[in-house]
Amino acid sequence: MSVSVEGPDFIALQVRDVPAAAAFFEERLGLRRAAASPPGAVVFTTSPVPFAVREPLPGVDLTGDARPGLGVALWLRTPDAGALRELLVAADTADVGPLQDSPFGPMFTFTGPEGYRLTVHGG
């Protein structure tokens, strides 16, 4: 018998400041909180994969110069990447890159909470 995974089922970014990270995703990207979240986390109503920000798991050290998410590539989908990019620029979001063509439609990158590099793509 062979068993395999079907793909990502839940994504959570580990952050030092959960309220600040949650506010960023709500205010800058328009995500909505789920009706319930476990202690130490904020879960959003994203589709097709649930997304959250959470306190670091035991054994994860985010003190000092540690950079959360180093090596992680997180892509978010939007119906209008250009319009969202302009909103992020207007809100003084850090390191918003130029809109570029990609195999997944127009895309750009920016720095999110606690240094995570995020990519947005879509129509």
Image (cartoon, rainbow, N blue to C red):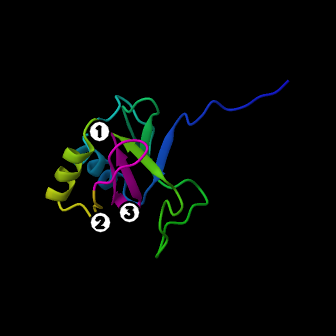
Q: Earlier in the sequence, mark 1 or mark 3?
A: 1
Question: 21 left or right of 7?
Answer: left
Q: Which residues are magenta?
A: 99-123
**Residue type marked 2:** Asp
For image coordinates 48% across by 62% down, the residue present is 68
Q: Nearer the viewer, mark 2 or mark 3?
A: 2
At mark 3, the secondary structure is helix
Q: Position of residue 120 (x, y in %)?
A: 35, 47
Please say if 92 is above or below 6.
below
At mark 2, the secondary structure is loop
Badge 2: how crowded within 10 Å, few (<14), some, or many (20+)? few
For image coordinates 23% across by 60% down, the residue present is 93
Inter-mark Cα distance, 1 to 3:
18 Å
**Residue type marked 3:** Glu
Toward the left, the furthest residue is 90
Q: Nearer the viewer, residue 13 or 100?
A: 100
Task: State the mark number for residue 114.
Answer: 3
Question: 53 left or right of 6?
Answer: left
For image coordinates 30% across by 55% down, the residue present is 20
The image quadrant where one finds the C terminus is top left
Toward the top, the furthest residue is 1
Task: State the mark number for residue 95.
Answer: 2
Task: State the mark number for residue 3.
Answer: none
Q: Nearer the viewer, residue 28 or 40?
A: 28
At mark 1, the secondary structure is loop
Toward the right, the furthest residue is 1
Q: Quadrant of residue 17?
A: bottom left
Task: State the mark number for residue 31.
Answer: 1
